[in-house]
Image: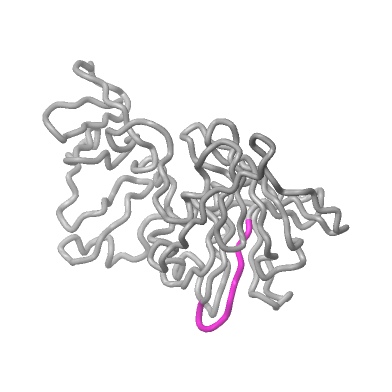
Amino acid sequence: MLRRIEPETIICYHEPFPEMAGNIVYVNYELSSWQHMNDDIVDTEQKKSDYSSSKSYRVVKYGGYIESNHQRPFIPDNHIVKHTGYVVQLGAGSAYGGNWVPKKEEDQRFLGEPGEINRFGYYETKIGQDGRATIERHNTNHGNPKIHSNPHDHQITWSQSGHPIPGPQINYWDGNLPEFKSYAGGNIKMGRVIKGNTQEQNAFTSIADFQSCMRHGGEVQFTYNGRDYGVFPWQKRTPESEYQFYIWQTGNDDSEAWYDTSDALLDYIIDGKKLREIITEVVVFDRTV
């Protein structure tokens, strides 16, 4: 529950809620700390104690840190969390309202004119009647021909917050590839050619950023210490298994592993380190969401 009490200030209450009055503001989930509430605690005791350093801290499950170099603004009983400009705990985002807005160049491909096909690199994205993507073709096997045909498709659904979610890959191992065209008035309706992300836009800024990518069906390829890796959601080792995520070092079958949650996936070991320790350091060269 939110209450605006002065310009640019939002207050968020924990249960039990006090008596509320005033105006309700609409908020944007994508800018909120809510999506980070299941993040891990920061990794070291040094980070926990070093409030005065120049380092920034993520919002985490227990409400201990925010993206700030200042003292944490939590009052002792922790019933009220206050921060100027943004909700920082149990919030629902910025006071903008509305649906998902693309933050990166490549994300622009998910929106467009009804019936058109947007193109970026290996990807072709078909736009539905509501101006949002309905299906996407990937003209690549993402460096892993074991689980992706070239090409393959992804049906795209949309979350309640308006975020695109590519579904499991649709492979065409038999070569029976359906035509991927959109017609309007009898003509092929070509969409935009989308500019690619910068390296900074592809990079994961936090564990929460990576988990959000996985939650929304993102396929990721990255380089670490000179070797390439791929991470793909929706993968199952057998039809009966419950594994949801697959990771491997490109070309090395002995490195592959399956996990049923993105949090477990972050325990995958690369060069003696857990993925959670290096995910913000890897060089991401392909990221679909």
| Residue 132, percent from left and from top | 54, 38
- Main secondary structure along the magenta-highlighted residues: strand
Residue in the image at 40% along x and 47% along y: 36
Residue in the image at 56% along x and 72% along y: 269
- How was the colour assigned to the protein in this rendering? one colour
State left or right for residue 234 relative to residue 277: right
State left or right for residue 120 relative to residue 245: left
Outermost residue to the front: 186
State left or right for residue 26 relative to residue 158: left
- The front one of 258 and 214 is 214
Figure check: 226 above or below 204: below
- The front one of 203 and 275 is 203
- The front one of 260 and 49 is 260
Figure check: 168 above or below 250: above
Outermost residue to the right: 174
- The front one of 183 and 125 is 183
Q: Which quadrant is home to the N terminus?
A: top left
| Residue 63, percent from left and from top | 31, 45
Magenta residues span 224-232
- The part of the image, by quadrant, that contains residue 105 is bottom left
Say if the magenta span includes residue 218. Answer: no
State left or right for residue 38 relative to residue 287: left
Residue in the image at 49% along x and 68% along y: 284
Residue in the image at 21% along x and 64% along y: 50
- The part of the image, by quadrant, that contains residue 140 is bottom right
| Residue 193, percent from left and from top | 51, 56
Outermost residue to the left: 6
| Residue 125, percent from left and from top | 60, 49
Count of marks, rendered view: 0
Say if the magenta span includes residue 228. Answer: yes
